[in-house]
Image: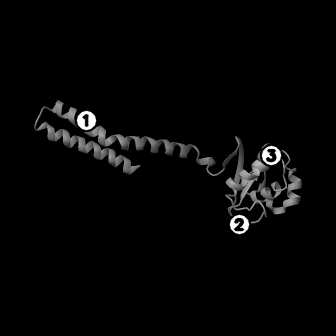
Amino acid sequence: MAKILLQIAGALVAAVLVAWGLTRAMHIGVAIVFAAPVFAALAARPIIDFIAEMNYQGKAAALADVQGRYWSHRGTRIDIAEDDDDARWLLTSHVRKVVPGLPRDEVLLKQFGERSGAVEGFDGFRIRADALAEFLQKSTDTPSLKFRTWLDRTVLGGSVNPRSGGSRA
């Protein structure tokens, strides 16, 4: 942003120098009329860049509290938390809105053990993304298949092979 402000200041200095140079040959009012387009030509792009940067900074400040945690599948918000090991944990109550056949939390805890449960620093019962992908491989209904595809491509980033269920490493 400092670079943009320096460009605007440079344009202003250039326009003042043009106006000052023209005052030697003509009246100051006429010199300013000729210097104004010089300022406009030099400052237009930096001013547009400054406004765009302010828009970006405003959005970044407003969305800082949900940075990295806001995910959406077909308009349904999914709360995803990342732990210290960079594993992603999905809030099961949000997943159930998309996948109605997801078992109760107690069943998930028995089936996946430490890959499901409470995550320190985050509220609610959660299931790790790779465990959910493993569970969804057995699904045949369309919403679950679409969610599994979204999970593999977006949340897991293509790290799980849909045929074998294992890592592509």
Which is in the foreground here, disc 2 or disc 1?
Answer: 2
Residue at 56% in and 43% down? 62
Q: Position of residue 16 (x, y in %)?
A: 22, 41
Q: Position of residue 27 (x, y in %)?
A: 13, 31
* 169 sits to left or right of 19: right
* Disc number for residue 168: 2
> Around disc 1, counting alpha carbons within 10 Å, would you say few (fewer than 14), some (14 to 19), or many (20 or more)?
some
User: Residue 89 is drawn in which quadrant?
Assistant: bottom right
Disc with the residue nearer the chain's start (2 vs 1): 1
Q: Position of residue 57 (x, y in %)?
A: 50, 45
Residue at 85% in and 52% down? 105
Secondary structure, mark 2, is loop
Secondary structure, mark 3, is helix
Q: How is the image coloured?
A: one colour
* Structural distance between the alpha carbons of marks 1 and 3: 63 Å
Q: Is residue 15 visible?
A: yes
* 142 sits to left or right of 70: right
> Around disc 2, counting alpha carbons within 10 Å, would you say few (fewer than 14), some (14 to 19), or many (20 or more)?
few
Q: Is residue 117 visible?
A: no
Furthest residue toward left? 25
Q: Position of residue 67 (x, y in %)?
A: 61, 50
Q: Which residue is mark 3?
A: 142
* Structural distance between the alpha carbons of marks 2 and 1: 61 Å
User: Residue 39 is drawn in which quadrant?
Assistant: top left
Secondary structure, mark 1, is helix
Identify which amino acid the numbered label 3 is placed on. Answer: Thr
Q: Which residue is mark 1?
A: 36
